[in-house]
C-alpha cells in the first residue's frame, strides 16, 4: 500500500545544509520515491511555519523504511540533523475509505 513520508524542519545553518539535497535526491530515486511537494516558502494555515516542507510518495511503507534505513543515508541524514532544528518526519499510509 502506498506510503507517504511527510517532513518539516527549520534550516539553522544554510551553508552546512547545502550538501543535503544533492545527497538525498539520488537515494530517494534509488528507493523509488516520488517527490510530490518540496517547499521553502509554504503558506501556513495553522501552527508555526517551518523553513522546509516535503511530501514523498513510496510504493509501500517497507520501501520508505528501506530508504530511511539505507546505510548510505546515514551521512546525509546527519547533515540535516546537524544543520536543522524542529525536525519532524512521519510515515502515513494512503487513506483507504471504509467499505460501504
Image (spheres, helix red, strand yellow):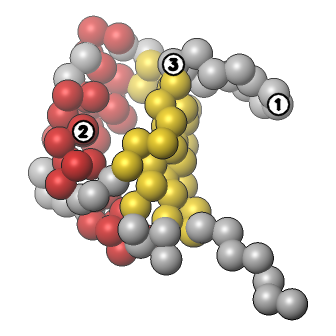
Residue bearing mark 1: 46
Q: Residue at x 13, y 51 (%)?
A: 72
Q: Relative to residue 2, is residue 65 drawn left or right?
A: left
Q: Is residue 31 depicted above or below 15 in this figure?
A: below
- Find the residue positioned furthest to the left: 72
For residue 85, side relative to residue 71 (left or right) = right
Q: Residue at x 82, y 31 (%)?
A: 46
Q: Is residue 73 visible?
A: no
- Which image quadrant is residue 81 in? top left
What residue sits 47% from the left and 31% below the top?
38
* Image coords of residue 48 (percent x, y): 73, 25
Helix, strand, or loop for circle 2? helix
In primary-sequence order, the first of circles 1 and 3 is 3
Task: Measuring from the top left, give residue 57's x and y in whole percent.
Answer: 45, 55
In this picture, is 15 found above or below 68?
A: above
- Closer to the chain start, of discs 2 and 1, is 2
User: In the image, what residue occupies the spot 35% across and 11% down?
Assistant: 14
* Label 2 Cα crowd, 10 Å radius (few <14 / some 14-19 / many 20+): some
Which residue corresponds to mark 3?
A: 40
- Residue 87 vs 6, above or below: the answer is above
Residue 93 pos. (x, y %): 57, 68
Q: Is residue 60 visible?
A: yes
Q: CA distance from mark 1 to mark 3?
A: 16 Å
**Residue at label 2?**
24
Quadrant showing the C terminus: bottom right
Label 2 vs 3, first from the N-terminus: 2
Badge 3 density bin: few <14, some 14–19, many ≥20, Cα 10 Å: few
Amino acid at each position: 500500500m502506498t506510503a507517504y513520508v511527510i517532513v518539516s524542519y527549520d534550516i539553522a545553518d544554510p551553508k552546512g545544509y547545502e550538501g543535503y539535497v544533492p545527497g538525498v535526491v539520488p537515494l530517494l530515486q534509488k528507493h523509488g520515491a516520488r517527490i510530490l511537494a518540496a517547499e521553502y516558502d509554504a503558506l501556513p494555515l495553522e501552527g508555526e511555519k517551518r523553513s522546509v516542507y516535503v511530501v514523498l510518495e513510496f510504493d509501500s511503507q517497507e520501501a520508505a523504511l528501506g530508504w530511511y534505513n539505507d546505510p548510505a543515508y546515514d551521512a546525509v541524514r546527519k547533515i540535516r540533523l546537524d544543520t536543522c532544528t524542529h525536525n519532524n518526519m512521519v510515515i502515513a499510509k494512503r487513506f483507504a475509505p471504509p467499505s460501504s
